[in-house]
Amino acid sequence: MANSTTDKTKAAEGLKTDAPPVTTMSVVAPAIAWLIPGAGHLIQKRWGRGLLLMASIVTMFLLGLALEGRVYKPNGGDILDMLGFVGNVGAGGLYIVTRAMDWGKGAIAHATADYGTKYLIVAGLLNFIAAADAYHIAIGKKP
Amino acid sequence: MTIQLSHFSAAVLFALFASIVFGITQRNTTREMLRYGLYCFAMFAGGVIAAGWVMWLLRR
């Protein structure tokens, strides 16, 4: 019985030490990285990486809009529309501004508009990866 | 403002931006990031060219 209790205590201690430290930066960095692509790296003084991520994701999103891609809404009704929304919403502030300005209607008249739709989705998904990377930097898992 | 891109230029731009993000986020040192980014770009662009040839062969 005593051993069991000791084991549980040790296990709990093990869990405590394995868990990443919750710091202000570990919460703020991924949040701001989602809202503004690349900003999660910039606030942690990873200037080069942050600017490159920002340039890549923002340019990709803007190219998607310029190619007349479609921006998905949350209540699309179709499962693929919902997945498209999940991808789009990853772009954070860019998605919010786009919806607020009522851009991204999507043109079905020409084939390259479909490229635009894919650019918009992938820009959001890449921003999710960038936000996760910002979190890993914040908890010290990555230099 | 709207723009029109060819299929190839759209695919190459896609490869460029995705490779930059993959390189930065998936590796730890600057040298590894550069190498992995170039590798991803080569795979994306090479995949597009290979898929193009496959479609050309299927069409014949």
Image (tube, coloured by chain):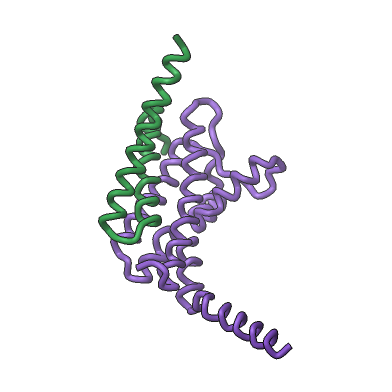
Chain colours: A purple, B green
Q: Which image quadrant is residue B12 in?
A: top left
Q: Residue furthest top?
A: B60
Where does the image place residue A31, in percent across and percent down from the top left? Answer: 50, 67
Q: Residue furthest left?
A: B31
The quarter in which the N terminus of chain A is drawn is bottom right
Horizontal side, residue B53 vs residue A116: left or right: left
Question: In this rendering, is residue B13 above or below A41?
Answer: above
Where does the image place residue A116, in percent across and percent down from the top left? Answer: 48, 37
Horizontal side, residue A48 vs residue B14: left or right: left
Q: Residue at x 61, y 80 (%)?
A: A11
Question: In this rendering, is residue A28 above or below A105?
Answer: below
Q: Residue at x 42, y 16 (%)?
A: B56
Residue in front for this viewpoint, B42 or A62: B42
Question: In this rendering, is residue A68 above or below A129?
Answer: above
The quarter in which the C terminus of chain A is drawn is bottom left
Number of labelled discs? 0
Q: Residue furthest bottom?
A: A2
Where does the image place residue B23, in percent across and percent down from the top left? Answer: 35, 52
Q: Residue at x 39, y 50 (%)?
A: B22
Where does the image place residue A139, in percent across and percent down from the top left? Answer: 44, 73
Horizontal side, residue A43 vs residue A70: left or right: left
Residue in front for this viewpoint, A97 or B58: B58
Question: In this rendering, is residue A68 above or below A111?
Answer: below
